Image: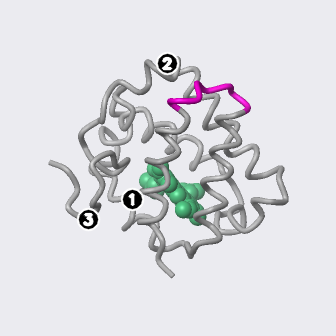
């Protein structure tokens, strides 16, 4: 059953995977590399300092969970849902202060990671749009 909290049809918070995006991406190893690069950049780049500051001391859990989550959302194994049930991303992000600044840094950080991994331009644009919908909906201040 799709989330009633999110108005978009291609939402990372839906139970239904939109299509087999993970195959288009290049499979689980590419997704793993993307998530690793995303969090590496978050630690390294001064441009993402506010985003980094919204996180705790360690990013280990976040790395693991984002990979699990995105796998299912992209049409691969539902590792996240198997472990934690419905993602309820907006609810789970309530403890963190998320405004326009954090949203935009999240999106820029992910887009940089996709660029560095040379994700196909059409797929990258599609993912960018979907990530925007979710990140924007996650704002809580
Ligand atoms: C918009 C800005 C965002 C901020 C500031 C943010 C911040 C955070 C923080 C601080 C955590 C906790 C990490 C931990 O457990 O150590 C987290 C968890 C998580 N985030 Fe985000 N996030 C954002 C956007 C997103 C987006 C767009 C997605 C998905 C496309 C996402 C997916 C997740 C997932 C799956 C978790 C793990 C949830 C759990 O089970 O606890 N986040 N995020």
Measuring from the top left, give residue 131's x and y in whole percent.
48, 50
Q: Secondary structure at mark 2?
A: loop
Q: CA distance from mark 2 to mark 3?
A: 29 Å
Label annotation for residue 27: 2
Neighbor class of circle 3 (other Cα within 10 Å; few <14, some 14-19, many 20+) is few
Q: CA distance from mark 3 to mark 1?
A: 10 Å
Mark whose residue sits in front, 3 or 1 = 3
Ligand 1 within 8 angstroms of badge 1 C-beta: yes
**83 left or right, relative to 31:** left
Measuring from the top left, give residue 93's x and y in whole percent.
46, 66
Chain-order first, disc 3 or disc 1: 3
Q: Which residues are magenta?
A: 116-123
Q: CA distance from mark 2 to mark 1?
A: 23 Å
Label annotation for residue 5: 3
Label annotation for residue 26: none
Measuring from the top left, give residue 104's x and y in whole percent.
62, 62
Q: Secondary structure at mark 1?
A: helix
The residue indicated by pointer 1 is 89
- Foreground: 46 or 43? 46
Neighbor class of circle 2 (other Cα within 10 Å; few <14, some 14-19, many 20+) is some
Is residue 9 positioned above or below 31 on the image?
below
């Amino acid at each position: 059953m799709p989330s009633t909290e999110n108005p978009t049809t291609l939402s990372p918070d839906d139970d239904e995977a939109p299509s087999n995006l993970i195959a288009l991406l290049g499979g689980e190893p590419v997704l793993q590399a993307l998530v690793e690069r995303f969090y590496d950049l978050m630690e390294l780049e001064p441009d993402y300092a506010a985003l980094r500051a919204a996180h705790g001391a360690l990013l280990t859990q976040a790395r693991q969970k984002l990979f699990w989550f995105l796998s299912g959302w992209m049409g691969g194994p539902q590792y996240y849902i198997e472990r934690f049930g419905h993602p309820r991303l907006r609810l789970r992000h309530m403890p963190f202060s998320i405004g326009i600044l954090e949203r935009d840094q999240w999106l820029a950080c992910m887009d940089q990671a996709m660029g560095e991994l040379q994700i196909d331009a059409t797929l990258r644009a599609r993912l960018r749009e979907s990530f925007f919908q979710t990140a924007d909906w996650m704002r809580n201040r």
